Amino acid sequence: MVSSFPDPVLLTLFCITLPAVLFLARYLVGTRRANQPCACKQLGATSQPGLGNWPSKFVDKFRRQPQPQQREQGPIVGFVNNLYIHPIKSCRAVQVKEAEVLSTGLQYDRQFTFAELQDPEGKANSNPLGLTGWHFVTQRKYGKLANIHVEIWVPDPKSCNYTQDQANVQSAGVLIVRYPDHRGGAGKHSFRTFEIPYSPTEDQIVERGYRLERLTIWNECIDALLMASTTHADPPEWIKDIQAYLGCSKPFALFRVATGHNRKVFRNAPRKEQLGYQSVVGFVDAYPLHILGLSSVADLDHKLTKVDPGFTDSTALRFRANIYFRGPEAYAEDSWKRIRIGQSSYFVACRTTRCELPNTDQWTGRKHVSQPSKLIRSYRDIDAGAGPGMACMGMQMVPAAEHGIIKVGDEVEVLETGSHHYILQ
């Protein structure tokens, strides 16, 4: 006769291990909650495959495209495949499934930047460019910025400790920043973290000692919010850590876009009379949005593997675009002048000129000596306005309205095409 009772040995093991399992589960949940900013939830915590995870063999997938669907307004040529936000300029991107579009671009995009103090001793004649004051820094100089991870945590009304007067709610959330620990013996994969308010209130600015300082972004000098600096009498440990990790020998700082101090966009952008508002940006290089076709990236990757077989991963993230779309043939976006994505329309202002930044691997921070920039210049020197030898890849855009929503899977419809002529700064 078969007993209906559990095996005594198994029952004993279950009774012994159950308390340990429950303790571990409780510990893990408690740890997660301890690391989670109060009254917030993480933005962009998605399992959607990122472009950086794709090998270059994805080329064939995006080089063979379906024919566009014809519509009365214009052809639907493709769909949004990936969306990326870069909260701190030149640091690791955050992938999202949808984002709010503001006059400055995607919400949270490039609202912070690291900077170094040029000519700190006031010896302007010793500086070949005659630069003084705080200047933004990017992967063009410090490739290891790519290894600094950023998490966006936004207020969560469903949180049990959510209240309107909670500090994280008042600051519209927080950023959690993880950076490699450069200290000896810390381990190859060891990281340290710090937390900063996303949009500090006036009271928080005073309490934390933030202040406005002049900051140069390319050839524009603006007032920006200085949040931490190695020049302070008692600087936070993390700003000194990142300075050392990057190998920066000059005074180092973190800035945020200050309320009311965005940079106005002109050059190829539509004018205020046409938009109904003045186009502005925070710390992006030039225009609010950057869009890039995956067929274009696929064509480059196909060429690149022939020139240098060492490139086995997609170069897509090296271009640090906000919007990656799939559908049309390679470089179809070159002739776009106005498009619709989802329910919103956009002016395609100009081509994106490419510097040496795409030579930096976005997963290691290492710079290749010449590629893919050398290859791009060999066949993408296509805009006379950009100057000789300036390659173009992707397009710069301005939202037709100050508010909108964009989602992965949104249709991309071409409303107007035409020629482009880049206007230099």
Image (tube, rainbow, N blue to C red):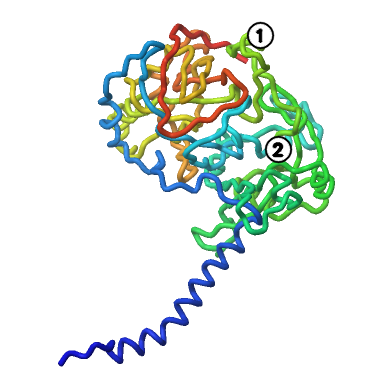
Q: Is residue 420 left or right of residue 112?
A: left
Q: Nearer the viewer, residue 249 or 5?
A: 5
**Residue at 79% of width from left, 45% of height from top?**
231
Judged left or right of residue 292, residue 219 is: right
Q: In the rendered structure, find residue 256 and report the number of the disc placed on it.
A: 2
Point out which mark residue 273 bears: 1
Q: Residues within 10 Å of mark 1 (few under 14, many from 20)?
A: few
Observer-nearest of 395 and 412:
412
Residue 308 is situated, as x and y percent measured from the top left of the image, at: 32, 33
Q: Earlier in the sequence, mark 1 or mark 2?
A: 2
Name which quarter of the figure residue 34 lies in. bottom right
Residue sitting nearer the eye, 414 or 211: 414
Q: Could you tell me which quadrant the C terminus lies in?
A: top right
Residue at the limit of the structure toward the left, as seen here? 1
Query: Spatial distance from mark 1 to mark 2, Cα to Cα?
Result: 29 Å
Specify the label residue 19 is tagged with: none
The amino acid beneath tag 1 is Glu
Residue 80 visible to the viewer: yes
Secondary structure at badge 1 equals: helix
Q: Is residue 217 above or below residue 24?
A: above
Q: Position of residue 320 (x, y in %)?
A: 49, 33
The residue drawn where x is 66% and y is 12% is 272
Q: Quadrant of the N terminus?
A: bottom left
Residue at x 47% of width, y 40% of height? 362
Q: Position of residue 92 (x, y in %)?
A: 53, 42
Task: Tell me the amino acid under the disc marked 2.
Answer: Arg
Do the residues bearing badges 1 and 2 touch, measured as CB atoms within 8 Å? no
Residue at x-position 57% and y-position 39%: 142
* Residue 316 makes an appearance in the image: no
Residue 212 pos. (x, y %): 80, 36
Side of 118 where 93 appears, left or right: left
